[in-house]
Image (cartoon, helix red, strand yellow):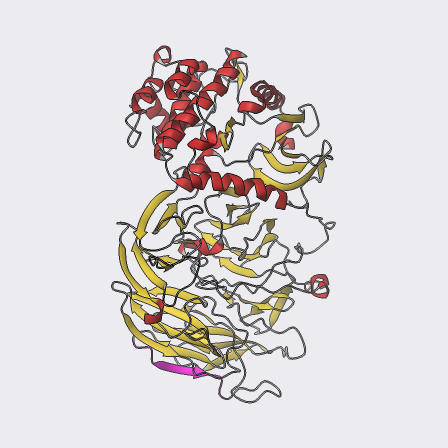
Amino acid sequence: MTHDDPVEIGGHRLIARLGHGGMGTVYLARSAGGRTAALKTMHARIAADTAARTRFRLETDAARIIGGHHGATVVDADPGAETPWLATEYVLGPPLDDAVALCGPLPEPSVRALGAALAGALAQLHASDVVHRDLKPSNVMVTAHGPKIIDFGIARAAGDDRLTRTGTAAGTPAFMSPEQATGQEHTSAGDVFALAGVLVFAATGHGPFGTGQAADLLYRVRYADPDLTGVPAGLAPVLARCLTKDPGRRPTTRELMAELHDGHGEFADHLPAPLLVDIAHRASAVWQYHPLRLAAPVEGPYTAPAPAGRGMSRRKLLAAAGGSLVGVGAAGAGAWVWSGRKPSDEEDALPSTDRAPRALWHADAGATADAPLLMTMSGAVATWQDGQLVGLDARSGEQRWSTRAFRDTSDITTDGKVIYGLLPGQAEGDALSLHALTPGSGVAQRLVARVTGFAGYGHAEVLLAAAGLIFVAARKVVPGHDTDVEQKNDWHLLAVDIRTGRKRWQMTMSEFDPGNAYTAVSVKVVGQHLIFCRKISFDRDDEPVDPHFFVAAADIRTGKRVWAWEIPRRPRDTSDIVPGRLAVDDKHIYVASGHVWALRLATGDVAWKFGDDRNDGGVAKGARRYGTPAVRDGVVYAAEGKRGLVALDASTGRLLWAEKEDLTQAWAPVLAPPPVIGRKYVYVRRDNGISAVDMRTRASAWTWDTPASLFAAHEEAERLLCVDRHSINALPFE
């Protein structure tokens, strides 16, 4: 929800956005009596079109005809309002495409029960002389009591072509009938054709005519045989008859109902367990939404509400680690970290400096139980929003795609194009299942690998996807031991080949370093090396030690450790500092604590260290702390103690320049997040927001007041992205 959204429509209080597209916006809403609803509105510019209003009225009528058994019950509607709106029951279940993304292809009993119920829904619609014309997986909601058909935006009375020009096609190409693809009359037989396509997708994860450009799809729909690869043998004949090009040879909905299922048993009994778990989760999650009270818009940058988050458990392995979720693919050199810090009320009220830019766009964002998310991809940024993973256009903030397949920040990573992760409901048994999703492609989530002997969702974390491998930290399944009870040395680091799905190698965490296996980890691939960094606060026996860093390099082909190095244990060196994104170039690895250290990539030897001769106004020499560094174009940047930013020669460690302004008595840098480096500015997290340090003047040009706990660059879009637990904001990146 943003300042541009209404607060109430038709007596319904708007709680959150569920979706936003070219035609309108769908909100989660509650009536005065507490009834939860999905409220759909039409954009004002579209509402000005008479034909569009007529379609909206027909959609409302069709939704009323199909009723609450096979569709979403209409609560109220006003197609004639200045902003037309339609409120229906909030369906407790995922769209079919999300269900397949979650579970993979559904088993034959599920597909048969689903098909029979959908055929019954279409039969009821057709009995009122209405055809749907856009049946597809995203328009089928799967609930515990049966599927519900939604979105009747292009439904119309059979034989009524007043809203469709002759020779044009309305609908979704991948699931159109041949007659619809040529702009001819779409009868009830056309809905049967589309239903068969939906069932092929449910059974296989792909549509009967593949994916691609609309023109290619329309050609295959009209002339090619359907691809029934993967369809169970018992289903293939009936679905093939439904997909014949001749409408007269397709079975009726009544015939299809009888052939698919005998009608016995509860619908939920036919669904796989992970899908039932997801339905139950949605039923609970809908009551976790609370209306967000928005302040009146003010001049200057948008300021999000203060986050109410909690600290992260020490036993979360990934804990603010890796850099694997930001700064990859087309995004270039970004950086991310979760500070876990909650600003005070006084800090929230602080204005930005007069020179600070306005936010170019802002959007809702949310956090999982573990952390917020900022994951840059080609042209897009992914974050949590209303309980789902969404992809926003990095330049404009418009939503591009969404999925409910994944739940937690630690379950996913990306190589910039594909998301790899663990799915809820996959923890049963002794196998680790890794899945891949190409956002916005129309292709369902696919299984990449199934590694036996290791626990799955809830007992494993995805660290990085790089060099054709997925690196995962997972707990080994030990016969006779409860998976929920941690055993010594049961955490392993695995490398899984993305192309073959085979495990390349596995190593126990103790083979890498002497620390406790469930403290924070950062990993990065450079050439043939996997760089592994951990902050050690506890030893292998879970006894506390002075916090320090351990860094190691392993051969990505074998997992064999090449070298290892520990920062000397000095109590004041690393307190309150966690490893953020690893700073690496083709020669060195850069880490920081009481000093900034450069380690040689090939051997792990210390190339240089910086900080011996620096002081911090009353703090003893050599004891000052340095923040997580970043490197670019031969320069290493790091926040220094309470003072500001330093720039070091990456080859020698020589001080090139230090930030001019003395911040000892002002807002100090936050040391955990690494700086984000642009062409003109270096962006540094401070107590009062994000400061842009001008490389030419070596002073802060402006500070943007924000409680954002994550910030990163999307260089392709020229945006600096800032995320807290409620919102994501985009600033110019210079």
Q: Which residue is outermost to the front?
A: 480
What percent of the width, then of the height, locates residue 672? 53, 70
Q: Looking at the image, which is closer to me, 326 or 98?
A: 98
Above or below, 726 against 636 in this view is: above
Above or below, 37 against 577 in this view is: above
Question: Which quadrant would residue 30 be assigned to in this image?
Answer: top right
In the image, residue 611 lies in the stretch drawn in magenta:
yes
Q: Which residue is painted at 50% across and 68% down in the image?
A: 674
Above or below, 125 against 533 in this view is: above
Q: Which segment did they paint magenta?
A: 603-613
Q: Which residue is painted at 37% across and 18% down in the image?
A: 259
Viewer can see residue 206? yes
Q: Is residue 96 left or right of residue 87?
A: left
Question: Which quadrant would residue 670 be assigned to in this image?
Answer: bottom right
Question: Which quadrant would residue 517 be assigned to in this image?
Answer: bottom left
Q: Quadrant of the N terminus?
A: top right
Q: Which residue is painted at 62% across and 74% down in the image?
A: 668
What percent of the width, then of the height, locates residue 37? 64, 34
